[in-house]
Amino acid sequence: MSSATSTRVLRIGTRASALARAQTGWVINALGVPVEVVAIVTSGDRSAEALTQLGGTGVFVSALRTALEAGEIDVAVHSFKDLPTKPEERIALAAVPAREDPRDALVARDGLTLAELPRGARVGTGAPRRAAQLRALGLDLDVVAIRGNVDTRLGRVGAGGGPADLDAVVLACAGLRRLGRADAITEVLDPIQMLPAPAQGALALECRADDAEVLALLASLDHADTRAAVAAERALLEALEAGCAAPVGALAEIADGDVGPEVFLRATVVAVDGSDAVRRSATGAITDAEGVGRRLAAELLADGADQLMGSSR
C-alpha cells in the first residue's frame, strides 16, 4: 500500500466519539495514505449504564473486531486499555504507537488540587479503579459514578459549559491532551497516588492477520518500548484474571539496566471501598516483559489480591 503502484484506499474503523475520532485522526496523519473513515457504534456507546454493569472488558471493541473480520474495514483503532487480554486468532495487533501520557488527571473547580478539595467534595469517575484508589487515599471524598464523553464530564465541574454538580472529575491525561483540553487539568496525579489502568494512554491498531499489505504499512507506527511496557501491564492483568472494570492499576516504564533495557513495573489492587490494598513492583529484561507481568501478578495474588477484586475477577 505504501508503494507508488498501490491504489487501495485504507478503510479505518473507529468509534464515533470525539476522542476516538481524534485518535484515529492521529493515525491517519501518521500513515499519510488515502483512507476512508468508517464509524462503528459499539455496545458501550449505546448504553448509559456503568461499565461494571455492561460487563466491562470488550464492550467498546467487539463491534470493531466484527467489522474487521467481515472485511468491512481494514484497520481498527482502539484505546488499548479497552482490549480483552485474550487475542483473537484472525486478528493481528499490527502496531502499538508511542504512548501518550499514561497518568490520570484531576479537573477541579476553582483550580483546586486533590489535597485542596474540602472533605465531602463530590468527585466523579466512571472507573472502579479510580474510585477505589480515591477512597484509599483517606481524603473523605464523596466518589460519584459517572458516564459520558469528555465534554460531558468536564461540564459537571463547570469546565465544559454544562451545569456544574461536582467538585472534580478524574480523567485520563491522554484523552484530554488528544482532544486539546489539557488546559482544563488542575493536577496531574502522581502514580504514587494513583496508578493508571493497564495500557492507559496507548493505542492498539488491529488488522486481519492475513492482510500482509496492511500489516507492513502499520508496522511503521509500532513503538518497541511502548509495546513492551503495555505487554507487561496486560500480562499482569491477564494473570490476575481481571477485566478492565477491575480495581487494578499498573504502569510499566522502560529504563537502562545493567545488562540492557529493563522493564520496571508497578501495580496495585485495591478494595472497591478503599479499605485495603496490595502494591508491589518488579523489574526484568525488556525481552521478558510478559514474564515480568506474570511474576508480579503471582506476588499480588499471594498477598490476597483475589479477595480484594471480589466479583470483578
Image (cartoon, rainbow, N blue to C red):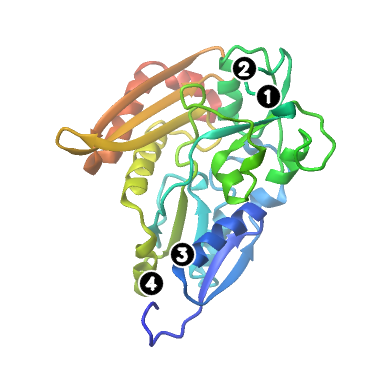
In primary-sequence order, the first of circles 4 and 2 is 2
Kind of residue indicated by mark 2: Ala
Residue pointed to by mark 3: 30
- Which is closer to the viewer, label 4 or label 3? 3
Q: Are marks 3 and 2 in contact (CB under 8 Å)?
A: no
Compared to 39, does 124 lie above or below?
Answer: above
Taking the spot 35% from the left edge, 48% from the top edge, the residue there is: 227
- Other residues around mark 3 within 10 Å, as few (<14) / some (14–19) / many (≥20): few
Q: Are marks 4 and 2 in contact (CB under 8 Å)?
A: no
Residue pointed to by mark 2: 115
Kind of residue indicated by mark 3: Ala
Residue 215 horizontal side relative to residue 174, left or right: left
Residue nearer the viewer, 113 or 250: 113
Q: Are marks 2 and 1 in contact (CB under 8 Å)?
A: no
Residue pointed to by mark 4: 211
Kind of residue indicated by mark 4: Asp
Kind of residue indicated by mark 1: Leu
Q: CA distance from mark 1 to mark 4?
A: 50 Å
Tell me where residue 212 sits by quadrant.
bottom left
In the picture, which quadrant includes the N terminus? Answer: bottom left
Question: Of all residues shown, which one is farthest toward the left?
Answer: 259
Label for residue 112?
1
- Other residues around mark 4 within 10 Å, as few (<14) / some (14–19) / many (≥20): few
Taking the spot 14% from the left edge, 36% from the top edge, the residue there is: 259
- Other residues around mark 1 within 10 Å, as few (<14) / some (14–19) / many (≥20): some
Residue nearer the viewer, 274 or 87: 274
